[in-house]
Amino acid sequence: MDTGPIVAILSESDEHHEACVEQLQSITGPLLTCWPVITEAAWLLRAYPLALGRLLSSFNGRPFELVPLNEPDLSGIAAILSKYRGLGIQLADASLVHLANREGIEIIFTLDRRDFGALRLARGKKFRVIP
């Protein structure tokens, strides 16, 4: 799960709030994300302390699950950042691509169709982007 939908779900004033909440209701499994995404979301929600509080309390098994990134993951993330330097992708996006490869995930919940439409999984396969 990318930053955009997290912010949209937690911020009722976000233009994508309804679409993301609707999509969230149709997902049965956990929504996996990582610390770079949470950091990015916290920055975007900094003016909304209640939403930021909801973000940090949203990891009790539903709806979000934090997947660890460790030192061995850094080289894979760096390789993705280097490969897609021309797109200007950020650490959060590269971390999600790396995790998708590591965990065998092909679906990404994101509002960033431009980047995730261009980013590829390790075998060249496209992500399935929702919503």
Image: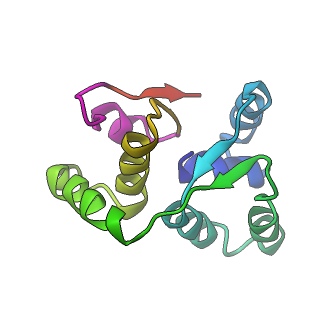
Instruction: State the predominant SS element of the stretch in magenta.
Output: loop
- Residue for point 77% across, 46% down: 63
Residue 7 seen by the camera = no
Residue 95 sits above or below residue 120 on the image: below
Q: Quadrant of residue 29?
A: top right
- Residue for point 81% across, 65% down: 57
x and y, in percent, of residue 120 in the image: 28, 34
Residue 57 seen by the camera = yes
The C terminus sits in image quarter: top right
The N terminus sits in image quarter: top right
Left or right, 118 with reference to 31:
left
- Residue for point 33% across, 26% down: 126
Q: Nearer the viewer, residue 98 or 1?
A: 98
Chain part drawn in magenta: 110-125
Q: Nearer the viewer, residue 80 or 43?
A: 80
x and y, in percent, of residue 86 in the image: 15, 51
Residue 42 sits above or below residue 98 on the image: below
Please tell me whether residue 43 belongs to the stretch shown in magenta.
no
Left or right, 62 with reference to 91:
right
Left or right, 36 with reference to 23:
left
